Image (tube, rainbow, N blue to C red):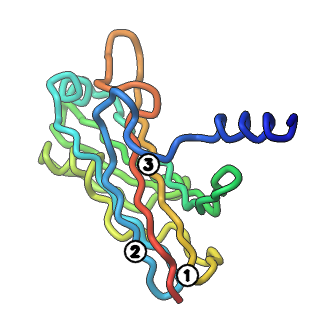
Amino acid sequence: MLSWLALAVVLSMSPAPPGPIAGSGQTVQVIPLAKDGEVYVSFKLEEALTDEIRAAIHSGLTIKFVYKVDLRRSSAVWLDRTIASAVVSATVRYDTLTRLYYISRTLDGHIEYADTTVSEETAWSTLTRDFARLSLFRGTPLEANAEYYVRVRANASPRNNAFVWPWQGDDAMGFAKFTFVR
């Protein structure tokens, strides 16, 4: 009887299947592609540029979106297992003197891309939508014909009481399942 009670407690504590954060309305669209022994991940956050975010960018603050990407394997009995993780960061800083947006993207702390632009739309796209076919899990051993999923959690900074982002906690989350066929 005690073992059944312990099992019920463990199952009730296991996380719900990944999905949008309750009440936030924000989701990250995720598309995994398993090809040639690699998992490529594309994702985007469909968030409109609001007046508050625009004002923060134009104030000269460095705006940073951090995407935590996890390759996971579902488990029917126990907690889902994280196979590999990666962190993708995108930043935008507006220079009020030159009227240029300095944009960059890092992958696990290494600069992958850096540029300048005069286009606000390009700068916003760098933060939210320019994440196509990223090779995040190269060399990760995967079991043939097994089902996996990729979960992406997004967080934005800076955060303070004067400037409120339109979402809370993990700002947005999304996932997509795939079967690794070899």
The amino acid type found where label 2 is placed reads Leu
The tag earlier along the polypeptide, 2 or 1, is: 2
Residue 33: give its label. 2
Q: Check contact, mark 3 vs mark 2: CB within 8 A.
A: no
The tag earlier along the polypeptide, 1 or 3, is: 3
C-alpha gap between disc 2 and disc 1: 14 Å
The N terminus, quarter of image: top right
The tag earlier along the polypeptide, 3 or 2, is: 2
Question: Which residue is drawn at the image coordinates 87% and 34% (left, top)?
Answer: 2
Residue on which the image places disc 3: 89
C-alpha gap between disc 1 and disc 3: 31 Å
Residue, far top? 162
Front residue of this view, candidates 19 and 60: 19
Q: Which-is-in-front pick, marks 1 and 3?
A: 1
C-alpha gap between disc 3 and disc 2: 21 Å
Determine whether the residue tagged by mark 2 lies in a helix, strand or loop: strand
Name the side, left or right, on which 57 lies relative to 86: left
Residue 56: give its label. none
The amino acid type found where label 3 is placed reads Ser
The amino acid type found where label 1 is placed reads Asn
Residue, far right? 2
* Residue 106, x across and y down, in percent: 45, 55
Q: Is residue 2 positioned above or below 129 on the image?
A: above
* Residue 31, x across and y down, in percent: 35, 64
Q: Quadrant of residue 73?
A: bottom right
Determine whether the residue tagged by mark 3 lies in a helix, strand or loop: strand
Question: Which residue is drawn at the image coordinates 64% and 41% (left, top)?
Answer: 14
Badge 3: few (under 14), some or many (20 or more) residues near its Cα, within 10 Å?
many
* Residue 23, x across and y down, in percent: 34, 26
Residue 145: give its label. 1
Determine whether the residue tagged by mark 1 lies in a helix, strand or loop: loop
Question: Which residue is drawn at the image coordinates 50% and 85% (left, top)?
Answer: 181
